[in-house]
Each structure stands twice: as structure tokens, then as C-alpha cells.
Image (spheres, rainbow, N blue to C red):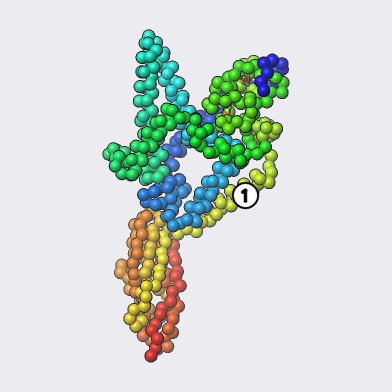
Amino acid sequence: MANTTVKTGPKTAPPVEAARTWHRARKTVHLLCFLAFLALPFLNVVRADIPRQRFYFAGYELWINEFGIIFFALMFLMFLVVASSVFYGRVYCGYLCPQMIFSEASVAVEQRLRRWVVKHFIGWQPKARERLFRAAFYSLLAPASVVLAFAFISYFVEPRDLLARLASFDVRTAAGISGAVVTVITFLDFTLVRQRFCTTVCPYGYLQGLLGDGRTLLVHYRDPAHACIECKKCVRICPMGIDIRQSPFQIECIHCAECIDACDEILGRLGKSGLIHYAWGEQGPLSSQARQPWDARRVVVLLLLLFYASGLTVALSMRHAVLVEVNRVNTSGEISNRFRYSIANRGSKPAAVVFSIRQLPGGRLELDPNPVSVAAGQSAQGEFEITAPPATGRELVTHFSLTADTVPGGENNSFPLTFLAPERK
Ligand code: SF4
Ligand code: SF4
């Protein structure tokens, strides 16, 4: 714990201007994450389109029946979070989580606006100033909540479609009602709840307790020389309102490193090094002095991540954008067989499928039109007939193949089928 006596000054004190390094890095990452949060649904990087029952991943439009690919995509994302937790602790909370990013932004706007109102309306009564501040703050937060709610719902409804609903003030359809509800929740979240969400609702902090171990990255206060001057700057600046000197394992700590910067800045002015650091575990080396030690657990987590990444890559590379299925309907007439086809165009461009038959002497494919055109994202079903002239010596069952060539794209499918002839009398 802290000691009020200043005894030694470390030899390698950082310059004062080096302070707030982590803060600047984190705010840069926050800005990039915010831009990505807005852009991802528009670029279909990750999106689950509920009305159309589609899942978008890395630009691929996956249909709901492509469960294998969706499974690999979800498992890959899950193990990405697991790996980041095992290696880097709560780096997601401090650097990447939208809840944290918007909570901190809301607090920063509130503090700046309050200072601005005090400065420019210094002659007003405090109560009138507070009312003015509240009105201005809520007026800013209301449109911001609409934008954030729009971005959030875009992950589940096509963003351009959603924009049209927003422009027409749609509050009758499911998407419109969801938009209104999420806007209200967002507004309340960023005015009342903010970081309390992390310690009350979000399970990730508790999950980290299971995933982390003695070598996971954490924020650690180390003061063997009793150099702490009890300024408490690290406590005042902490967005979670905790004192890191009590323990590095507090559930509230999001490893944001604001306390590292604060201590570096204060002690840097006295020509000393800060007492709070990123470290590889409570007893481990500081992250700035050594790499994280490896063990079997880390190797297994990384191998699992690689396994799902490879599975996803293979599944996506084997995927056919246009899926053609052919099934026999029944036999009709003397030597005429009917079949049913179904085509699913899972690509983003229109496509046509050309059917033809092989290895059926004298056989004729009766399908009109052929090729069959299918618009992007649509499916088509139909039936066709294959007839063959009566011939002596024809087997009751003749094996042949039906080919389906897709244009453009050049994908071709070959279906081994059987042609059934009636029993000779
Ligand atoms: S900022 Fe550093 S010196 Fe100040 S109280 Fe915290 S640990 Fe001690
Ligand atoms: S204790 Fe430090 S690292 Fe943890 S949340 Fe507070 S400021 Fe961030």
C-alpha cells in the first residue's frame, strides 16, 4: 500500500512531456474504433441482416442455411476475444469497447461544456447556470444518441433502408420502433449509466477473471522504494473511480492506463519515474522491459484461433456464390423423366445458369428458358424434362450427368443422375 515518505528517486526518470502517452494512444484508437463502428455495417464487414435472414462477414453475403461458414466465423470472433483476454487482459475494455468509448466521450463533453458555461456566464446565478448547462448538454446528446442508435441498428437492418425509415420518421415498423427504443436507451445510458454498465451489467469483467492467469497483462502499482507522495492523482483520474494501489485485480479496472500517465506526470516533475506500469502478471516483468512469457495455455489458445481462421478461409474459398440443386420429380410417359432444380444466387451480381446433359445418347433437355437468370440475392426454382428416344437394348437405368455452368464467374456443377426407362414388355 501507499507510503507517505519520499525516500529514493529512481535513476531513469521520464521527461514530463512523455506523460499522457497512453492517453493519447488510447484516444487515437477510440477515434479509429468509432469510425469503424460507423463504417462496418455499410461495408458489410460484420452484419446480421434480420429482415433478409442474411449474415455478412468480410464482404461475403452468407445465407442462413450456410451454417458451416457462419459457425466458423462466430467461433473465430469468439476465440479472438478469448486470445486477447488471455494475452492482454482487459485491453478490449480499455481500448475497443463502444460502451467505454461513448461513456468517456460523454463525460469529456459534459466536463468541457460545464467549464465553458461557467466561464461565459460567470455573472449568472449558479442554479440558472446549471439549468443552462443541462439544456445545452441534453441538446447535444439527443442527436448524438440518434446517430449511435442508427449505427447500432445498422448491424441488423440494411443501413440504406434504415436511413430511409429514419428520414420518414417511421415509428410503426419493427425497425422504426427498435430505432426509437434504442435511441432512448442510448440517451439514458450516456447520461445516467455510463461506466456503471461495466461493473453491473457486462459479464466480460467477470469472464476475464476466468481467462486471465499469472502472466496476463495488467496494470500494477510497484513501489519497493516507498516513493509514493500520496498525491492521489492516479485515483482522481481513474474513470472507474478506484485506487489501483489497493490491488491489480479489482474487477472495475479496465487497464486503461490513465493512472500510469498520471503518476508518470506527477513524479516526472520531481525527476522520478512513475510507480504504476503495465506488467506481465503481478510478479512478472514490466511489459516495457520484456515480452510476455509463453506457456502451453497460450499455445493452445493460439492454435485454436488458427484452426478456426483456417476453417473459415477454407469454407469461404470453397463456397459457390450460385448454388444449384437438382432432384428427380417422377417418371412420366414412356421414356421421359422430370426433374426439379433450385438456384440460389448468394453473390452480389446477377447470374445465369446454363443447363446441359452428357452421356445420355439421344437425350434431350427440355427447359425454357435455358439459361435461367437469377438476380443478385434471389433464388429460383423450376422443373425440366429429359426425354430419350425408345431404343432397343436401353437399360432400365441409365447413368448420365447434368451440368450447370454459371455465367459470369465460370463456376460449373456436375450432377450424376439416372434416367429411368419403363420395363420392356
Ligand atoms: S499518482 Fe503516483 S505518486 Fe500520486 S498517489 Fe498515485 S501512485 Fe502515488
Ligand atoms: S486503475 Fe488505472 S488502469 Fe485501472 S481503470 Fe483506473 S485508471 Fe484505468
Question: Which residue does the numbered mark 1 point to in the structure image?
Answer: 303
Report the residue at 42% width, 55% height from top. 63
Quarter for ligand 1? top right
Position above or below: 136 against 70 = above
Task: Find residue 409 and report its horizontal and vertical position in percent.
Answer: 42, 59
In this picture, is 234 found above or below 358?
A: above
Quadrant placement of the C terminus = bottom left
Q: Can you name the residue that lies furthest to the top here?
A: 123
Q: Residue furthest bottom?
A: 425
Tell me the quarter of the image containing the N terminus.
top right
Picture residue at 46% right of the left edge, 24% below the top: 108
Residue 106 at least partly seen: yes
Amino acid marked by disc 1: Leu
Residue drawn at x 53%, y 38% is 203
Percent position of residue 79, x then y: 56, 46
- Between 344 and 332, the residue placed more toward the observer is 332
Residue 7 x %, y %: 71, 16
Nearer-the-camera pick, 418 or 271: 418
Mark 1 packing: few (<14 Cα in 10 Å), some, or many (20+)? Answer: few
Q: Position of residue 155 (x, y in %)?
A: 41, 43
Query: What kind of element bears circle 1?
Result: helix
Is residue 120 visible to us here? Answer: no
Q: Quadrant of residue 280?
A: top right
- Residue placed farthest to the left in the image? 168
Residue at x 70%, y 19% (from the top left corner)? 226
Farthest residue in the front direction? 200
